[in-house]
Image (tube, grey):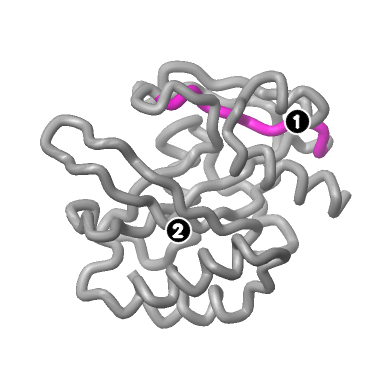
């Protein structure tokens, strides 16, 4: 993983409010840790990447049902050691979870930053995910739910608040709507 590139992206990103400014400060501090991308780094946590995937018409977002958290969320997940960049992690996760390859990157680089708690599960203690989110535009509405997800579906932007209660997803979708 190219840590220097992630630091440059974080520095270039202009958080719109104090919450995201705080997330960015914490992410930059995490970049100084010995293994900020390792899935087994639990104190305070590790980086993840995800994507808000818009339909070609820009009127719907692709959400997946997250099994452990029991929420409708954007595709995303952990950094693999072979991922060259955090953006590559988001692209790989979209491919692995909904079978979409090579989506177009939105026009803004990082769309959103979020740090959220992950409860203990099995042998993993409670920790935080430091999630870097990108905007992707799907080339078609075709997708293939893979074995990694329970369910996936397109949700109209106007209906997202009726499908998920996750504040960070709602915030990211609001950013997309404001920029349209």
Q: Residue at x 69, y 33 (%)?
A: 61
1 vs 2, front mark? 1
Q: Residue at x 67, y 47 (%)?
A: 172
- Residue 86 versus residue 117 in the image, above or below: below
Q: Position of residue 21 (x, y in %)?
A: 60, 69
Q: Which of the two residues, 113 or 141, is positioned nearer the viewer here? A: 113
Residue marked by disc 1: 60
Q: Earlier in the sequence, mark 1 or mark 2?
A: 1
Res 163 → quadrant: top right
In the picture as drawn, the residue positioned furthest to the front comes out as 18
Q: Which of the two residues, 176 or 19, is positioned nearer the viewer here? A: 19
- Residue 145 versus residue 16 in the image, above or below: above
Q: Is residue 175 left or right of residue 33?
A: right
- Residue 7 versus residue 79 in the image, above or below: below
Q: Provide the major secondary structure of the magenta segment.
A: strand
Q: Give me the disc on residue 87.
A: none
Q: Position of residue 18 (x, y in %)?
A: 64, 66
Q: Judge the density around disc 2: few (<14), some (14-19), many (≥20) Cα neighbours within 10 Å.
A: some
Residue marked by disc 2: 88
Q: Is residue 128 left or right of residue 5?
A: left
Give, as a single range, the part of the protein colored magenta. 58-66
Q: Which of the two residues, 68 or 4, is positioned nearer the viewer here? A: 68
């Amino acid at each position: 993983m190219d840590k220097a590139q992630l630091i440059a992206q974080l520095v270039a990103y202009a958080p719109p409010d104090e919450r995201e400014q705080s997330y960015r400060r914490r992410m930059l501090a995490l970049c100084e840790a010995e293994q900020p991308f390792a899935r087994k780094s639990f104190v305070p946590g590790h980086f993840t990447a995800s994507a808000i995937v818009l339909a070609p018409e820009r009127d719907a977002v692709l959400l997946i049902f997250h099994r452990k958290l029991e929420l409708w969320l954007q595709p995303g997940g952990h950094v693999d050691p072979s991922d060259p960049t955090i953006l590559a992690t988001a692209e790989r996760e979209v491919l692995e979870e909904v079978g979409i390859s090579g989506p177009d990157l939105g026009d803004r680089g990082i769309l959103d930053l979020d740090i959220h708690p992950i409860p203990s599960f099995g042998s993993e203690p409670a920790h935080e995910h430091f999630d870097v989110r990108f905007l992707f535009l799907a080339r078609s509405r075709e997708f293939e739910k893979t074995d990694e997800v329970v369910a996936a579906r397109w949700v109209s932007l106007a209906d997202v608040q009726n499908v998920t209660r996750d504040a960070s997803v709602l915030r990211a979708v609001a950013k997309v709507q404001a920029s349209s």
